Image (spheres, helix red, strand yellow):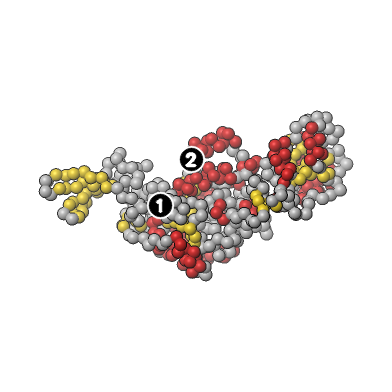
Amino acid sequence: MALAVASSSSTSISGRTFSLSTPSSDLKAPLVGSFRVFDRAHGQIQSQAVTFSQRRSSVKPVNAQPKRNESIVPLAATIVATEAVEKVEAEDFTQLAKGLENASPLEIMDKALEKFGNDIAIAFSGAEDVALIEYAHLTGRPYRVFSLDTGRLNPETYQFFDTVEKHYGIHIEYMFPDAVEVQALVRSKGLFSFYEDGHQECCRVRKVRPLRRALKGLRAWITGQRKDQSPGTRSEIPVVQVDPVFEGLDGGIGSLVKWNPVANVEGRDIWDFLRAMNVPVNSLHSKGYISIGCEPCTRSVLPGQHEREGRWWWEDAKAKECGLHKGNIKQEEGNQSNGNGNGAAHSNGTATETDIFTSQNLVTLSRTGIENLARLENRQEPWIVVLYAPWCQFCQAMEGSYIELADKLAGSGVKVGKFRADGEQKEFAQNELQLGSFPTILFFPKHSSRPIKYPSERRDVDSLMAFINALR
């Protein structure tokens, strides 16, 4: 949407009079205005277009409402004044991070806003990172807030966005995914493909690419990352760093700075702060949600569970990043990802963890055994088999219920088995046994050649029994 700016006022500069007059049809970002120049020598008015590059002129709003860069919808009638913004060379940020290591979040936030003015914005997800907005508000400096609307957020999160805007008197700058990309993904793979092949592709379309567009209009951004959020990916994040993944306004590696004011703050301290300051919070928190993302990929956690266990719960906790902070993920020496986001295995494709699902009522199937089982068209009895990896925490989490299931089905005519499908067996399991992520549970009916995949993420005994009873 183009923003037309018109004013009857004039300004005398070096003997020439400038008056603002900008037809809306002629204005295209990043053109801010066109000026009509009065030539005193000839008594004529000459039209002259003047383009202000945001790379050359850093601007900060005079009022409390932030100006939006070309990457984000502009605010109408925002008054701005030119102001030089201090620019720190990239090599200084390592030293700056050391100097701020023991600083309070408020001090870090103030330093970030001071250095980057209107060229920095807070990334707000609609969860407890509302603390960032409160810290920015307490500095007394103008600030900007943006959020990624994936189109699949919880209704409570949308309501919370509105509450935050009214509480702080701000406008959140929303970024949306490309409609054509979303349409292509859904038409080709369905609405819930991430349960089968991992969340990365969906997050790339709905979150990472919109974020990339937003950051191209900034020189720095502020996140709510904390070291205690995800031990596998965030334990070493500094309070300020050159962004290792995304590019900023000037383009190229090193053109964007990433601030993490609450990196050293523990989750319980964040909540103490929110309560003390009477900050509004997402109503999902009262329902057991801690880390909040998209509705299909977020669920509540039980007391004592880590907050990230509620995000992408079907995948490995050590690699739970959507791509917004993928620079945090490091490959351990001598280890590799198993390619499915389900944890690390040794370089020879095997894991060293003690085997699981050990019970006298459970049959351990070899590669030959499960091939024969899958090949049979007239089985003597139905089977339920779990495809697992012993290092997978979600397999470990369902061990008790699966063993209980085996005990319940003992003598019932239904066989309960397990097949270790990681390492060398993974490709076979993916191609022949419908393996998407660990654990995958298959039911081999008595009179059918094709196994039926258990579709639910509920792996308690009652849910598994209901699945079996519906098919046997």
Give the residue type that dot 2 points to: Asp
Residue with the most extreme right position: 411
Q: Nearer the viewer, residue 235 or 454?
A: 235
Left or right: 455, with 329 as reference point: right
Q: Which residue is mark 2?
A: 178
Label 2: state its secondary structure. loop
Quadrant in which residue 352 is drawn: bottom right
Crowd rating for badge 2 (residues with CA inside 10 Å; few <14, some 14–19, many 20+): few
The amino acid type of the residue labelled 1 equals Asp
Label 2 vs 1, first from the N-terminus: 2
Identify which residue is drawn at 35% across, 45% down.
29
Residue 417 visible in rendering: no
Q: Is residue 359 above or below residue 451?
A: below
User: Which residue is the site of mark 1?
Assistant: 250
Q: Which percent across, then down, holds residue 70?
A: 38, 47
Can you tell which mark lies on residue 404?
none
Quarter containing the N terminus: top left
Residue at position x 74%, y 43% in the image: 425
